[in-house]
Image (spheres, coloured by chain):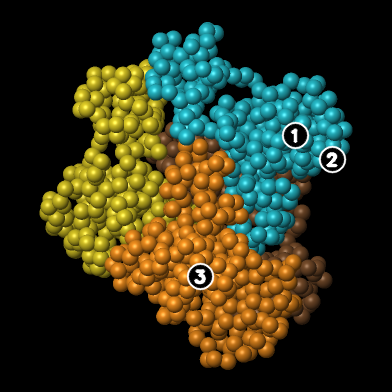
Chain colours: A cyan, B orange, C brown, D yellow
Amino acid sequence: MVIVIQCADQIGLVAKISSLLAEERFNILSMHEHVDKTADLFFMRLEVDKQSNGSLEQKLHELLPQNAIVKVNPNPEKKVIVMVTKEYHCLADILVRNYFKTLGASVQCVIGNYTNLEDICKRFDIPFHHVIFNNASPESEKQVLDIIAGYEYDYIVLAKFMRVLSPGFVGRFPQQIINIHHSFLPAFAGANPYKQAYERGVKLIGATAHFVTDELDEGPIIAQQIISASHSLTANDMMKAGKEIETAVLAKALRMVFDDRVFIYKNKTVVLE
Amino acid sequence: MVIVIQCADQIGLVAKISSLLAEERFNILSMHEHVDKTADLFFMRLEVDKQSNGSLEQKLHELLPQNAIVKVNPNPEKKVIVMVTKEYHCLADILVRNYFKTLGASVQCVIGNYTNLEDICKRFDIPFHHVIFNNASPESEKQVLDIIAGYEYDYIVLAKFMRVLSPGFVGRFPQQIINIHHSFLPAFAGANPYKQAYERGVKLIGATAHFVTDELDEGPIIAQQIISASHSLTANDMMKAGKEIETAVLAKALRMVFDDRVFIYKNKTVVLE
Amino acid sequence: MVIVIQCADQIGLVAKISSLLAEERFNILSMHEHVDKTADLFFMRLEVDKQSNGSLEQKLHELLPQNAIVKVNPNPEKKVIVMVTKEYHCLADILVRNYFKTLGASVQCVIGNYTNLEDICKRFDIPFHHVIFNNASPESEKQVLDIIAGYEYDYIVLAKFMRVLSPGFVGRFPQQIINIHHSFLPAFAGANPYKQAYERGVKLIGATAHFVTDELDEGPIIAQQIISASHSLTANDMMKAGKEIETAVLAKALRMVFDDRVFIYKNKTVVLE
Amino acid sequence: MVIVIQCADQIGLVAKISSLLAEERFNILSMHEHVDKTADLFFMRLEVDKQSNGSLEQKLHELLPQNAIVKVNPNPEKKVIVMVTKEYHCLADILVRNYFKTLGASVQCVIGNYTNLEDICKRFDIPFHHVIFNNASPESEKQVLDIIAGYEYDYIVLAKFMRVLSPGFVGRFPQQIINIHHSFLPAFAGANPYKQAYERGVKLIGATAHFVTDELDEGPIIAQQIISASHSLTANDMMKAGKEIETAVLAKALRMVFDDRVFIYKNKTVVLE
């Protein structure tokens, strides 16, 4: 069973928490904690060897500073909705892991801006909804919201959904939308990052998985990775090479999020691997 | 002997050049070429097994398109001036390689904004000049220019010279000033990149070696590298961890430049490793 | 159109080849060459802008040293057979790329040691053959040979086929069988490399794609990659983490091979990327 | 102040230790722990905000299982002796960090098998002793032991000391000798690892820092790193490229050891970064 805690820092927190768990006869299988001294915040993720009898969350709250966020056994069967445009690589990776039950969540449906990815969804028995989507168009967003309303979900994954969502849309799903951006943010935010990278002549290209907030490509970063890019790559070559790390970075970010290892504060994340 | 060529692209250039070298009885030890199709430019670096009798450069010019840049046996004994502020890591690496004759150039002198690095220069018998330097102050730059005037040099290396040079100063040394910037440019240009990186919550930090142009941190990039940076690093930890890659990236860039492997065009570089 | 050449080294080879191509009005789009001085061998891969009229291969042979290997437009529609045991990650990656026509080859069938991967093959309309396979058992190998005989193929890919093939079997497919081994070869050849790695306490774990020869895990290496592995990983965690790079390394090796970038000599490869 | 603990694992250890520290009014600045479930061992490193009044070590022993290893404020001013042959890169890096007081230890003397590194030691005011050293020769080892006897030291660093030490010699300094080996161990143990790597045709080359035990290149690994190595590198090129990571890996390992982050058990290390 997983326990996650986020609260104001205090002397003796680890002692208090671990003493309570010892009293309650939980054996700690793994414990990761982090303290941000400048923000005075404490973060902890624990794995213990048995399920809670139910009162543990309450007992933890009694121990901890006010306004602590405590999750005992956070939803272990997470559900996700995936949004895509035309590129298949991130989606296919998600569908494969979903099929083999190694995603850490189950895919409820895919919403696509084109129909070219409908067939692969069908091959994996995942419902596909086609919505013609112009950037932040109210009509398109309305259609998407109607579709989403028909499903249960914990997260919405933008798996190369190359459209901008309106602040209104994003605001409905705080800390729930995860995007993969094809650059090493904050470099090359916005459109055509590979073209920007090519023109700037960088020697490395990257990919960034992040939570989506009101500000385009400015949300809390979950994972990043880069590969080298010599002068011999055109913008198009960069795009091809980049797909491999986009897939890898998004996969890693989802694993971390679905495994309750990611904490958000001050437009940043703590990732307790 | 090294030969470098940069010219407009044309069908048959490789055939022409390699035929000429075969006729002149040069054996090609290594040949690297690159064509930028969008810019229609051809770049080549050759190593051949003997010294030129002198007429080779002329013969190459006759073969090649107009305005070709051809260097046969470019200065093999390059000289450099190093500018520093307080941090020692890049300077010490350069001094050590210089002392063991593996730098690919010889250090003429060091100009420092503080005196704390004077002693290590003396230990390696390298002249040290102290100039109190405020950003782009005409007086300081004048003093630096006066010192530089007393030396021969091919390149000026800013080895953590944490001051801004004026366009007037930079303009005197086109394609001759090499800087190490402590971020993955174009992210976090300007002052305090580690603080910026910390605040943005990036998961990787980087370093960039580049030629200096009028625009701050906007010149052609020669080499870049990154290391991972988890949430557990403070801005100060990032600074410490970053020093290791700053040293490595600058060393690599200098090796490439001093070895005549770097070509500049359109605010980019081609690096024929 | 692709041209690949492997032959004894000689002064003027590049000149001869590029002159012939210029005469024949081929425009060279890319050219990569390598000379192994110790083995006195020359390797070249060219991309030119039009199809051959047919006589080019003959003309190249006339130019080049005896026994040169020359392939003009090597089979651009390669066919592969994939062999698997139980693990899905490499196979699924291959099936997805095959389906989206980005594999660079087409999968003819999958031969599996268990039936658990049959369903995903069917979902992608790929024939699946089940063969109970004990290490190098003549009966099992006979069954596999019979199945293979029913297909056209250029390569056999062992996508986590965790069984040993006999020298007799391997000998029938020289330079045609590609394996992914889950260690940084030559470290941890043979069975249970992650267990071996865990017990040795290494700080990095790797994966190696290589051609299969008579000697187990000793064939020419095509690609390798590593990820860091702290003390906190159990052998089982290493196995999980390793799957990601196994998939990536095999994908890269296949891309290189199917794109005619890999040359074999002296139990090594030259990979002209 | 640093506290390190290594003992048999037990339920509630974290609670006990952190409660004791809270009682004693230590504020925990950082805490890293690791449990090896298969070995049933518990490892912890703590940084607290004030010096001990002296009784803390005793109190910890009372809390912890028998035979616990507890170090409160382990020697914060470590001393090291460095042994070298001819190559300068690791030694120079150590001398520079020592000079700028960022090594985490102070270099007492250097013992060299040749005299070519004597001058750089003198430039940094470090005593240099020349000992002609044949592999495991009793006379040479006797000379080294006599020199060592004249200094205080916590560790002996083999900074490219390309000679084999006898088990008798090694046995006198358990867990005190740190070596840098120029391969990705366990691949290419023994002599000429770059030549071995070149002949095997690997696509990555590595370096390994490890504690020295009786068995050549078989001791507990502290840190490893790799760089890519294409077919274009000769054995000699690999050696040159490898120097950069040898320097980096040894520097990292020393930082971890001198900072009391490395625990040894079962021929492995736990590195609590």
For image coordinates 51% across by 50% down, the residue present is: B192
What residue type is disc 3 on? Pro
Do the residues at discs 1 and 3 belong to one chain?
A: no
- Label 3, label 2: how far apart the Cα atoms are: 53 Å
Q: Amino acid at mark 2?
A: Asn
Nearer the viewer's eye, disc 1 or disc 2? 1
- Rendered location of residue D258, percent (x, y): 30, 43
**Circle 3 chain:** B
Q: CA distance from mark 1 to mark 3?
A: 48 Å
Residue shown at 56% from the left, 29% from the top: A263
Subunit ID for the residue under disc 2:
A
Disc nearest the viewer among 3 and 2: 3
Q: Are marks 3 and 2 in contact (CB under 8 Å)?
A: no
Q: Residue at x 68, y 78 (%)?
A: B7
**Residue behind mark 2:** A134
Q: Nearer the viewer, residue B126 or B6?
A: B126
Image quarter of the C terminus of chain D = top left
Which residue occupies 52% across, 10% down?
A: A58
Q: Is residue D95 visible?
A: yes
Q: Secondary structure at mark 3?
A: helix
For disc 2, the neighbor class at 10 Å (few under 14, some 14 to 19, many from 20) is some
**Residue B54 image position (x, y, % from top left):** 54, 91
Q: Which mark is residue B138?
A: 3
Q: Secondary structure at mark 1?
A: helix
Q: Report the residue marked by disc 1.
A: A167
- At which x and y percent is residue A105? 66, 26
Camera-near label (1 vs 3) is 3
Say which element carries label 2: loop
Residue D68 lies left or right of residue B206; in this view the side is left
